[in-house]
Amino acid sequence: MFDHDPAAAPMLMDIDVDAASPHEAGTIDDLIDFTSELRAEALELIKDYRWGPLFTPPSEEVTVHLPGLLGGNNWAGGVWHPGTGMLYVRSRTMPSLAILNRIDDEASHTRYSADSRTRLSGPRGLPLFKPPYGRVTAIDMGTGETLPAPQGAYKTR
């Protein structure tokens, strides 16, 4: 991990990035199933989309990206606590859609343009995939161990 902020010293370290991401690729089992009706609606919503493992590239078919263009842990960055040596990373699941549109203009320098919709909603405005929708992961920078960060109310000293 490298902090590109020139005002800060670089933080070089090895971490298990998989532990800090929620869903990395959806399967049928990851679709919501709070009720059988919602499950059936989720299956109907997703049936016409192409989707696969993490880094499935967009194509001329509408492709589901999970954790999504604004999902994962790439936008918010992390927070390091120097007293404990813990790095806290926020991540979230926010599926999005992408498609490549063919450009048939011979004057164009590219054959495709990318188009995306930054949010893919599930049935009745609910999320399409099961929780967690977001989480905070604590990474011990001394050992590399990852732990779910405590969330909710806390007492100050």
Image (cartoon, rainbow, N blue to C red):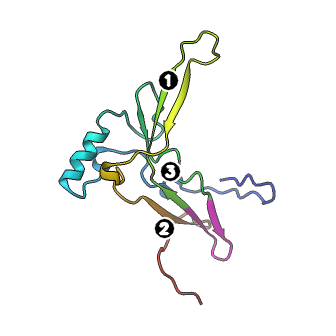
Residue 152 at x, y = what percent? 47, 76
Amino acid type, mark 3? Gly
The residue located at (49%, 53%) in the rendering is: 18
Residue named by callout 2? 147
Amino acid type, mark 2? Leu
Mark 1 is surrounded, within 10 Å at the Cα level, by few (under 14), some (14 to 19) or many (20 or more) other residues, namely: some
Amino acid type, mark 1? Asn
* Quarter of the figure with residue 104: top right
Tell me the quarter of the image containing the C terminus: bottom right
Residue 51 at x, y = what percent? 38, 36
Q: Is residue 140 magenta?
A: no
Per the model, the C-alpha gap separating discs 2 and 3 is 20 Å
Q: Look at the image and give the residue range highlighted in magenta.
A: 78-89
Does residue 70 appear left or right of residue 39 in this picture? right
Specify the principal SS of the magenta part. Answer: strand
Q: Give the mark nearest the N terminus, 1 or 2.
A: 1
Nearer to us of marks 2 and 3 is 3
- Residue 101's disc is 1
* Quarter of the figure with residue 108: top right
Q: Give the mark nearest the N terminus, 1 or 3.
A: 3
Q: How many marks?
A: 3
Q: Give the mark nearest the N terminus, 2 or 3.
A: 3
Q: Determine the secondary structure under disc 2.
A: strand
Residue named by callout 3? 71
Give yes or no for contact between labels 1 and 3 (Cβ–Cβ under 8 Å). no
